[in-house]
Amino acid sequence: MKSEPSVYGIDDLRRDRRTSWGGVRNYQVRNMFRDDFATGDRAFFYHSSCEEPGIVGTMKVLGKAYPDPAQFDPESEYFDPRSRPESPAWLAVDVQFQRRYPQPLSLDVLRRHPALESMLILRRGNRLSVTPVTEAEARVLLSLAAGLAGRG
DNA sequence: GCCAACGTTGGC
DNA sequence: GCCAACGTTGGC
């Protein structure tokens, strides 16, 4: 799950302990929230548009997706006048802070790893702020992350 | 339903 | 700031 640290980063999540991951206005992501997210799922936190893009930690999904309240709030930048409460267009999920890596798993490192070659988030032109990670990819990422800790 | 124009994203 | 790449929009 991708976010710009200048907007909301891993340190913000660590401080808040948990947050509503909303404001996503993309139908593919909406569908993933709706169909693929389950309580207890784990997710990687990715920093984009920053000095060192990469995976900076992990979090846990706290429950099923629910209507993103911001879509009904005219004051919100995520307001969607076409959305109706009886058929909400956009969803959000609650996530809980789990871990912050001592240093980011940099985009460079991720790109160099053959086992991560087909990860969607690394694909050129990827537009999705939430992308699936396979079991095998997750294992590789977690072991790379474990390696980071040692270098402290 | 097509498709060009447009806006946004994100790495560099 | 640039630019490639994509999703969305809207005219037809």
Image: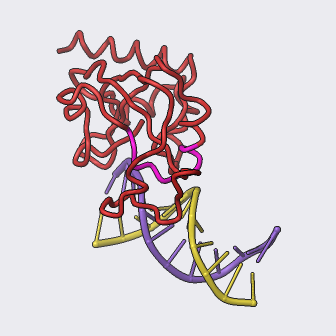
Chain colours: A red, B purple, C yellow
Indicate the position of residue A74 as horizontal and vertical percent values: 35, 63
As drawn, the residue found furthest toward the front would be A86
Q: Nearer the viewer, residue B8 or A35?
A: A35
Looking at the rendering, in which quadrant would you find the N terminus of chain A? top left
Q: How many marks?
A: 0
Q: Nearer the viewer, residue A104 or A117?
A: A104
Q: Which residues are magenta?
A: A21-30
A60 vs A118, left or right, is left
Q: Residue at x 44, y 40 (%)?
A: A92
A11 vs B2, left or right, is left
Indicate the position of residue A45 as horizontal and vertical percent values: 36, 31
Q: Residue at x 38, y 38 (%)?
A: A21
A86 vs A111, left or right, is right
Q: Is residue A130 above or below residue A13?
A: below
Magenta-colored stretch includes residue A29: yes
Indicate the position of residue A125 as horizontal and vertical percent values: 52, 52
Q: Is residue A16 above or below residue A92?
A: above
Q: Residue at x 27, y 16 (%)?
A: A148
Magenta-colored stretch includes residue A80: no
Indicate the position of residue A67 as horizontal and vertical percent values: 48, 43
Q: Residue at x 50, y 34 (%)?
A: A65
Looking at the rendering, in which quadrant would you find the C terminus of chain A? top left
Q: Is residue A56 above or below residue A40?
A: below
